[in-house]
Image (tube, rainbow, N blue to C red):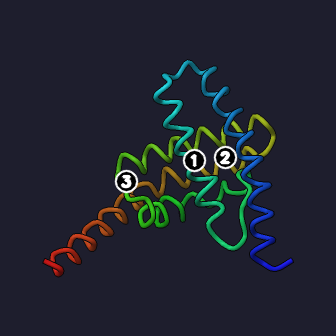
Amino acid sequence: MDDYANYEADSKKIIAANKKLLSEFKIWLQSSNLSEKTINNHISNISFYINEYLLYYEEPIKAQDGIGDVSTFLGDWFIRKAMWASKAHIKSNAASITKFYTFLLGKGLVTSNDLNELKLTIKAELPEWIQALKQYDDLANEDMDDEW
């Protein structure tokens, strides 16, 4: 089997596992008495993270193994790839990712050390991610000014 066929096969397995995780995550969120809008927002954010970003590169990454990728996702990839990227969306995704990996901790799929590290990373780097978004937007606006 060639590399692309391996990637496709691995991705299909991961997507199937992600579908189950997202369903269980939704039930877990519902048990917290969150509004349907908030639940749907968390599900949408996590679906994008685990089904788009973690599968984007040559080696697809399982959801539980993506806990260490939040910095690259929110500090770079999300800013460049999601046209809806904003300060509010970065914060919303950070909250969703924290909730998701807290849920995975309860399932025994991540460790408490990994979750603590995730929380520390988000707390420490969130201002940098927002600054990166601002710089990206400023550069995009400057490029547009050159076109006009």
Q: CA distance from mark 3 to mark 2?
A: 27 Å
Q: Amino acid at mark 3?
A: Trp
Q: Amino acid at mark 1?
A: Lys
Give how far across and how far down residue 17 sits, in percent.
Answer: 77, 47
Looking at the rendering, in which quadrant would you find the C terminus?
bottom left
Q: Amino acid at mark 2?
A: Leu
Q: CA distance from mark 1 to mark 2?
A: 6 Å
Q: In terms of sequence position, does the residue under pointer 3 or pointer 2 come before the other?
A: 3
The local secondary structure at tag 2 comes to: helix
The local secondary structure at tag 3 comes to: loop
* Whether label 3 touches label 2, CB < 8 Å: no
Give how far across and how far down residue 31 sits, in percent.
Answer: 63, 20
Query: Which of the two discs, 3 and 2, sits closer to the camera?
Result: 3
Q: In terms of sequence position, does the residue under pointer 1 or pointer 3 come before the other?
A: 3
Which residue does the numbered mark 3 point to in the structure image? 84
Q: Residue 112 or 78: which is nearer the viewer?
A: 78
Residue found 70% across the figure and 52% down from its top: 63
Query: Which of the two discs, 1 and 3, sits closer to the camera?
Result: 3
**Residue 119 - label:** 1
**Residue 115 - label:** 2
In the displayed structure, 69 sits above or below 94; it is below
* Whether label 1 touches label 2, CB < 8 Å: yes
Q: Residue furthest left?
A: 148
Give how far across and how far down residue 24 sits, in percent.
Answer: 71, 32
Q: Is residue 135 left or right of residue 34?
A: left
Q: Residue 7 or 93: which is nearer the viewer?
A: 7
Q: CA distance from mark 1 to mark 3?
A: 24 Å
Q: Residues within 10 Å of mark 3 (few under 14, many from 20)?
A: few
The local secondary structure at tag 1 comes to: helix
Give how far across and how far down residue 66 sits, in percent.
Answer: 67, 57
Residue found 74% across the figure and 75% down from its top: 4
Residue found 18% across the figure and 80% down from its top: 147
